Image (tube, rainbow, N blue to C red):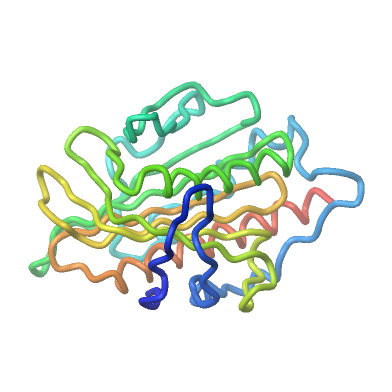
Amino acid sequence: MLPDAVGAEHGPGGRAALVRAALGHCRAEVGGVRDDPAGEVGRVTAGRGQPGRVIADPADFGPEVTKRSPYQSGPATWPVLGTDCVWQQKKPVRSVLATRSRSFEVPAAGGKGPMRLSAVVTVHRGRVDAQWEMAESVEETMRCPTQQLRKGELIGSLVSASLAHGESRQNNSEDALIETGTYRSSTLGGPFPYVWQQAQTLQFTVAVTGKGAKGWTGEEIDVLTTRAQAAMLLRLKAAVEKQK
């Protein structure tokens, strides 16, 4: 779990402060993906099939994780945070070649409520587009420290931190973000811990989310999301190297 120092101050037009240890726990031996000297890896035809090969499945989070219905989104939806800080599903922007998301759950058991998880893989037309997605994610946290995911679901007290490749032994991706806060649900209650991680390599971004429930600690959520994120980065590295 992140240290207390993660609570970064946000000034007007500023950026969440870098926290050196923020993603130190996410050190799967991916070894980084090198740039393709011939240009961006994963052209249009190849890129469209990558999300299905990279995205996490239940086992990547842990043996207790199951599919949640609806399990998988179609490629025609793209989440957009409105000016009212409410998330909406819209048509993907032109820079997105392909995207896929999946929903998971750890069923209620042993006095703990059902913990909800998700994973997303997106392929952009180029590296710059993926970098813009990462930058916009930071801006969204500063612009909307409280956000409505859908009717009856709110996340708040959001703070984010970024870690570039090579910083504090972050060698899994070119850029990495982590966002923490609280999660409230009209059906599950709250506030509970909330964790979101996103990483970018070449024109790819991968992300995982953990929305807490009764009895779940932030550390426990962190273990599951970090495990799945590492698995996707490993698959992405293998897919990119196969194309070279």
Q: Please say if 79 is above or below 120.
A: above
Q: Which residue is found at the position 38% from the left and 67% from the top?
A: 7
Q: Is 170 or 117 nearer to us in this picture?
A: 170
Quadrant (top left, top right, bottom left, bottom right) of the N terminus: bottom left
* Residue furthest to the front: 12
Q: Residue at x 73, y 44 (%)?
A: 127
Q: Is the residue 3 above or below the residue 229 in the image? A: below
Q: Position of residue 84 (x, y in %)?
A: 33, 30
The image shows residue 194, relative to residue 82, as above or below, that is below
Residue 135: percent from the left, percent from the top?
58, 47
The image shows residue 43 at horizontal and vertical percentages of 78, 35
Left or right of 2? Residue 76 is right
Horizontal arrangement in the rendering, residue 58 relative to residue 192 (left or right): right
Quarter where residue 218 is shown:
bottom left
Q: Give the image location of residue 108, x and y in percent.
A: 14, 59
- Closest to the observer, 63 or 189: 189
* Towards the viewer: 94 or 72: 94
Question: Residue at horizontal 55%, vertical 57%?
Answer: 232
Residue 61, quarter of picture: bottom left
